Every structure is written in structure tokens, then in C-alpha cells.
Image: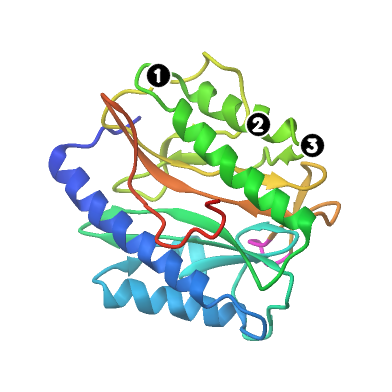
Amino acid sequence: MIRLKTAAELASMRRACEVSAGALAAGGAAVRPGATTKDVDDAVEAYIRSHGGIPNFKGYNGFPAAACVSVGDTVIHGIPAKSHVLQEGDIVSIDTGAIVEGFHGDNAYTFPCGAISPGAEHLLRTTRASLFAAIAAAQPGARIGDIGHAVQSYVEAEGYSVVRDFVGHGVGAELHEAPEVPNFGRAGHGARLVPGMTLAIEPMINEKGAAIHILNDGWTVKTKDGGLSAHFEHTVLITAEGPEILTQWQVDPWNS
């Protein structure tokens, strides 16, 4: 069942999303050559807790960290580790969120670690742009399929592939709520968007093929062909006037 949010619930969601966006920025600031993915996770968790939130990923179905930190060919759900040292040229996806007053924020961004290759930069810029194309399609009266179609058509025109095994989702009192929000689909199909819906829209885009595989840890998702992958996400509220981004990124190096 799709849960429409009341004004009081949205006030709590706004606070959760503000903390989530700040935590994402804190994690991004920790991305540098020589840092570890555990350093990134520590920065995220410290920010969330110091701003009155609870890391919503930590302990979720047994996940051990406050953030998923996914590097290079890792699509999503990378487990932070002291042993994983970031290198110049890496691309580093951070996916995190916070619980505040019983409601969730959820956001992700793929950061460059130092200077990256032109190919990696194009992947990041394209994936980021596909997110905003999807948000622009999330108008009241539109349908879920319009969101996925916007992502798919944008990135496939650039020669990239959409991950199909994982999708966006509703978000609110639960981290994952109905409806599912695929990054592919047919325009004009799926659930209708109405004011009060809150969605985590999150393109996961691969440099090469769409196929993925999950490591034996049960979490880490990698591209099957070893190509790079990028991931960008906002929590978005559907209003009568149009989509409103609740997780306004505080750091956005690709906004140019």
C-alpha cells in the first residue's frame, strides 16, 4: 500500500532528509586518496548522530555500517572496511540516510577520488543528469513508468546500461515502502503519482552491461563484466505543484 504523508509526517521527513543530506556531504568530504572506506563510514555516522539522527542503514537486515560505500565496479551495498584504501582515480558511491522522529531520509552520490578518467567523469555526469530527468518526470498525475522511462532513455542514448535487479522505492516511516520505482519502463504505465507520495529515486547505471552479481558476503553488488557503475539518489516529495527534492545535496561537484 502506498502511504501518503500528512503535514506533520512531512515535517519529520524534512528533518530526516536534511540530516541525510548533511551526512552524505560529510562522507563525500572524507573521500580522498589514502583514506579508507571505513573512514568515509565513520564520517557519515558521526554526522548523523551529532545531528540527532539514527543511521537507518546500520543493522538494517544485518548491514554492519551507517553507509554503503561502493567503489569502481561495485554497484551498491559496498561494506566499508579499514582494509579498503581509496586510490586516485576511484569513483566512490556513498548511499546513506537517517531516521529522525521516526521517519527516514535516503540519498546517494558518486564522488570522484582525486582526478578521474574522462570516461568515468562522463558516466558520473550522465547518471546524475538522469536522476534530474527522472525527478522532472515525477509530476502529479504522471505514472511510475514515466520516471523509469526518463532514466532509461537518457542513459541508453549515451551507451550505458540500467541496472534492473535493484530499483528505487517509496520511503517514509519505513526505509523501503511501496511503490517500487524502477529505472526503466514504459511511459504512461504503473501507479499514478499523487501529492503526498515520497519516493527514493535512484538511478544505478553501468558503464558496460546491465548484468550484476552478488558477492558471498550477501551484500556487495558488482557489475558482472567489471565495468564501472554510478549511483545517485534523492528523496522526492510529490506536491500539487510538482516534485520537491527533500535531500538537497550540500556538496555537488558535478553541478556544472
Q: Residue furthest right?
A: 225
- Name the image quarter holding the N terminus: top left
* Main SS class of the magenta portion in the image: loop
Give the labeled residue for mark 1. Answer: 192
Q: Is residue 45 above or below residue 34?
A: above
Tag nearer the camera, 3 or 1: 3
Q: Secondary structure at mark 3?
A: loop
Give residue 128's position: percent from left, percent from top: 58, 46
| 43 or 64, nearer to the observer | 43
Give the labeled residue for mark 3. Answer: 159
Q: Which amino acid, mark 3?
A: Gly
Tag nearer the camera, 2 or 1: 2
- CA gap, disc 3 and disc 1: 29 Å
| 1 or 200, nearer to the observer | 200
**Residue at figure coordinates x 41%, y 56% from the top left:** 249
Q: Which amino acid, mark 1?
A: Arg
**Residue at figure coordinates x 74%, y 30% from the top left:** 157
Give residue 202's position: percent from left, percent from top: 53, 44
Give the labeled residue for mark 2. Answer: 154
Q: Is residue 148 left or right of residue 153?
A: left
Q: Which residues are magenta?
A: 216-220
Q: Earlier in the sequence, mark 3 or mark 2?
A: 2
Give residue 29's position: percent from left, percent from top: 50, 74
Q: Earlier in the sequence, mark 2 or mark 1?
A: 2
State yes or no: residue 217 in magenta. yes
Q: Which amino acid, mark 2?
A: Tyr
